[in-house]
Image (tube, rainbow, N blue to C red):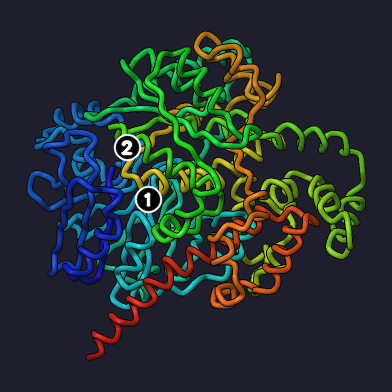
Amino acid sequence: MCGIAGAFGWTDDAVLSEMLAALSHRGPDDEGQYVDEDAGVMLGARRLSIVDPSGGAQPMYSEDGSVVAVCNGEIYNHRSLREWLRGEGHTFGTDCDVEVVVHLWEEVGERLVDHLDGMFAFSLWDAGSETLVLARDRIGIKPLYYGKTDRGLVWGSETPALLAAGVDPRLDPAGVYDYFRLEYTPAPTTLFEDVRKLPPGRVAVVSAEDPGESPFEAVSTRRYWSPPAGRVPAAEGFDGAARRLRELLDDAVDRRLMADVPVGAFLSGGLDSSAIVGLMSERVPDLKTFAVRFPDEGYDESGEARFVADHFGTDHYEVDVDLSSLDRLAAIAGRLSEPPSHVQFLPIVALSELARDRGVRVALSGGGADELFGGYYRYDVVPERRRRLARLPDLSFAVADAAASVAPVGRLPLRYFGGLRDDESVLRRINCGFNRLPEPEEYVETDVDESRSGIDEAIADAMDRAAYDDTAHRMTTYDLLYMLPDYVLFKTDHTSMLASLEVRVPFLDRRVVEFAHRLPPGYRFGGGRKALLKRAVADVVPDRIRSREKHGMGIPVHEWFRSDHDVVARWLTETNLEATPYLDAEGVLDRWREHRRGRANHGRMLWLALSFVVWYHEMVDRYRGRRAESRAVRRR
């Protein structure tokens, strides 16, 4: 696990050091740099030592030193790849998993990504062919951003590294719109005009021979993976599918125990994390588990987590999260690539710090199971309501849509009803959060709407890549391609790495993902929520946990904005709001007043606004000042 950074078209040792300093939390153990002034290329890495701690320093080089790479993440099949590559005549100098990347490039070129099994984002430079390669894992577990400066192309694991290199921190109105509409920015969009995300399952090649007129034009991306179009034969039967899923989960957990440091687990007491802990307990002696405890019994699940920990005999630890956790918002937001769009960022940071302080460097989590096996309420309810309304004429939905834009009351149910017209409408109006009120247009001032924000392209992509003509399947396809990497996994990666903790997600093993995507909808969504997963782990997870309703990490954010907490009062002021681009100060304050008086529940919207304001002034303003100083020095 590392933080990586680099530049193409220019070099500056001091700038590379600044980029890596911005990523020091991702790799507190070591730093390595490669600079080729003649070629105009520099690569660097901050290392969190997980595999081969004593010998796995990055960058990694080929035998003759002509190929160099830095990688963030883990290559789980590196041992089998190493054996094959040795048979082809390659020589290895370390036991580190990252070393296979350079030798694979020598052996198969750009197709190396097809051979890699893991979570990764890497950059590779081939001096012989003067070719730069950037790549990201299939699901998007590890992030990779690239941007343009006045001097050339830059890239890194987090946007602060790019801003440290001189990328203009000017906000992108489309990204701002997406953030307030979706709570995330779907790749390749970011909140910055001059920064892009490399989407999951993509490889980008940059050639010195064809630099283009701007750094972005030099980047040629190719999609090397998408959810498979083939289907699992229904003849296998439900029980057969459950057995196959169990086999895949056993293997996924085995692979993610690859480490030369202690491995633990996050435990909420729900089905997903309990399944992972159960499978780990059979393989890891003295397993440590970690849970969050909330003071409000209506939100606290720590009792269920303790039950599971006792059942499996783990060494269990808990951390308290309450309203006082807001005191850390500025410190957290000021180090993130995007604002912490959900209040869950706070407990995940606390959980990650707890694991680190107890000597764990790697933690497994149950993330991804909801998106794969129908864990969200909407996957059940929306398809059922669509079936009930199937015979209504399109005009009924069109009238509801039109009325929703002008109705003084009842706008939310009207928008919801209009979104049930067809599957594309479901993705647009319901799955993408378009049913939430207030709408961004009521308190965000951009000239962007949904047709120009990039959301249309994301929806079309999900529709094209669905394997079944089924509403729930299309919803999960969109979530797998966009919501999962750009929201859920972004949240997990950035928060855990603030604590220098690596989090691995067995449910997002490529084989598990492909199997789930190909399952007939009746197996995947029928029989009750997560019925297939419950069958697959029935001999591991206690009945009490398998029969519980899903809760999620609930946090009383609505109540928090009715309190007099200093953080909220200090940041949500007219002065701060007016100094934050694209926010309508009066629109935000009006809704805060409505919320405090109990006339509406705007807690989620207020959290988005608060996080955006704090992030902008703590992170963006800092780099705006640095960029101005740097340009002034260069003019002298």
* Residue at screen point 83% across, 63% down: 405
Residue closest to the far top = 539
User: What amino acid type should be assigned to the residue bearing mark 2?
Assistant: Arg
Q: Is residue 527 among what the camera can see?
A: yes
Residue 517 horizontal/vertical position (percent): 57, 31
Q: Between residues 20 and 371, which one lies in front from this camera angle?
A: 20
Residue bearing mark 2? 356
Give the position of the C terminus as an image quadrant.
bottom left
Residue 403 horizontal/vertical position (percent): 89, 60
User: What amino acid type should be assigned to the residue bearing mark 1?
Assistant: Val
Instruction: Determine which quarter of the picture holds residue 628.
Output: bottom left
Disc 2: CA contacts within 10 A as few (<14), some (14-19) or many (>=20): many
* Residue at screen point 68% across, 46% down: 431
Q: Between residues 596 and 545, which one lies in front from this camera angle?
A: 596
Disc sitting over residue 232 in the figure: none
Disc 1: CA contacts within 10 A as few (<14), some (14-19) or many (>=20): many
* Residue at screen point 44% across, 62% down: 196
Q: Relative to residue 363, is residue 9 drawn left or right? A: left
Q: Between residues 226 and 361, which one lies in front from this camera angle?
A: 361
Which of discs 1 and 2 lies nearer the camera? The answer is 2
Instruction: Determine which quarter of the picture holds residue 132.
Output: bottom left
Disc sitting over residue 203 in the figure: 1
Give the position of the N terminus as an image quadrant.
top left
